[in-house]
Image (cartoon, rainbow, N blue to C red):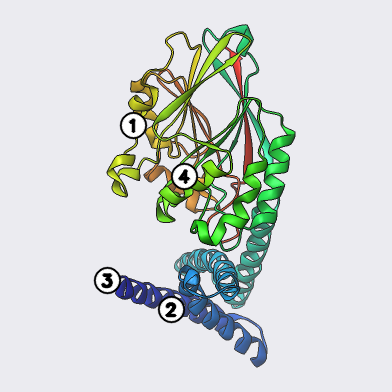
Amino acid sequence: MTPRRSIGTATLIVALLHFYIGVRLLPALPMPLAGHVLATLWLMISTIAMPAALLSRRFEAPWGDRIAWVGMVAMGLFSTLLLLTLARDIVLLACLLAGWYPPRLPMWSAVAVIVLALLVSLWGFFNARRLARVVSADVPIAGLPAALDGFTIAQISDIHVGPTIKRPYLERIVERVNGLRADVVAITGDLVDGTVEELSAHTAPLAQLRAKNGVYVVTGNHEYYSGAHAWVEELRRLGLRVLLNEHVALERNGARVVLAGVTDFSAGHFDPAHRSDPQAALAGAPADAAVRILLAHQPRTAPAAVAAGFDLQLSGHTHGGQFWPWNLFVPMQQPYVAGLHRLESLWIYVSRGTGYWGPPKRFGAPSEISLVRLRRG
């Protein structure tokens, strides 16, 4: 199927789903004619704006960003409206089958759907746009020398600088990360949604990131959608160390830490030379290192990290599901959704992400700046 036909098919499906919402809710709502007209107009705008948002980069500035904003906000509201409308129909059917069907039930249930959808979307918008909170996680490492007890890694992930996330949003993140005074800053992929030409002015604050032992980056799948090779060069120009299946050896009070990074799990589909390889990332690492840490965008790198001999993997990608109920579907692709997990001898910490993708909406999955601290096990 050609891209144009795919977009046309997606637009038709979106239109039919909007029609379903309108048919099921609008007749039951106690509104004057003007209210019904406005509601119908919004459904029409949303139907057009959602697919347009996915094509917003084709429009000249500033219209591209404006279209993206309208479409992504509409997408977030539509998602919740659709789920609640489906839930309402199930409840109405159950009440009908049970023989309990008050005359005003359709009206009040329709009102409840609208109110809940608006409240969830407003709260989700606030959560997405606010500065991510710092979430601390202590990781016990067996045999960790006293010199490395308390070694800290400030992890940021999945910021998705792009149509709705710009320089001011990133500046606030950089300021908060620098305030943590971590030993290492790690960026675990999906930093951008757009080309270097489009976004270099907005990613410039990354040059201000500071850590005692440096700032390190690995690629995520969205870097490959946006021109990974150009972004690698741009991040290096900003003074960040990009780890492409390679490692660095760090030292603290005479004890060594190996910090490695792999390309995204799917990178080999875009460039065979970028195939993710934890074994290669560890090749030549000092044998006396007290701990081996891997930065890998996707949690599903974990089995390969175990085989390679890593002690800790830091990942992102999942956004913690970003907003309910999509978090319920993440385990279909990834073994871990958020937080600290264990696989054999490997600890895996999965960040919920520091920004968001698509709709500016986070509900039940708050954004985070992760502060991972090594502790003696």
At label 3, the amino acid type is Thr
Gap in angstroms between the C-alphas marked 4 and 3: 30 Å
Q: Which mark is residue 277?
A: 1
Residue designated by label 3 = 2
The label shown at residue 15 is 2
Residue 346 percent location from the top left of the image: 44, 21
Q: Quadrant of the N terminus?
A: bottom left
Give the vertical position of 252 relative to 52 (above or below): above
Q: Is residue 295 above or below residue 327?
A: above
Residue at the (53%, 62%) spot, across then down? 198
Q: Splitting the image into 4 quarters, where does residue 151 fall?
A: top right
Q: Which element type, helix, strand or loop, lies under badge 1? A: loop
Residue at image mark 4: 232
Q: For the residue labelled by badge 3, is the local secondary structure a helix, a strand or a loop?
A: loop
Amino acid type at image mark 2 = Ala
Amino acid type at image mark 4: Val
Which of discs 3 and 1 lies nearer the camera? The answer is: 1
In this view, the residue farthest toward the front is 237
Q: CA distance from mark 1 to mark 2?
A: 43 Å
Residue 304 falls in image quadrant: top left
Which residue is pictured at 70% across the width and 55% down the height?
Answer: 168
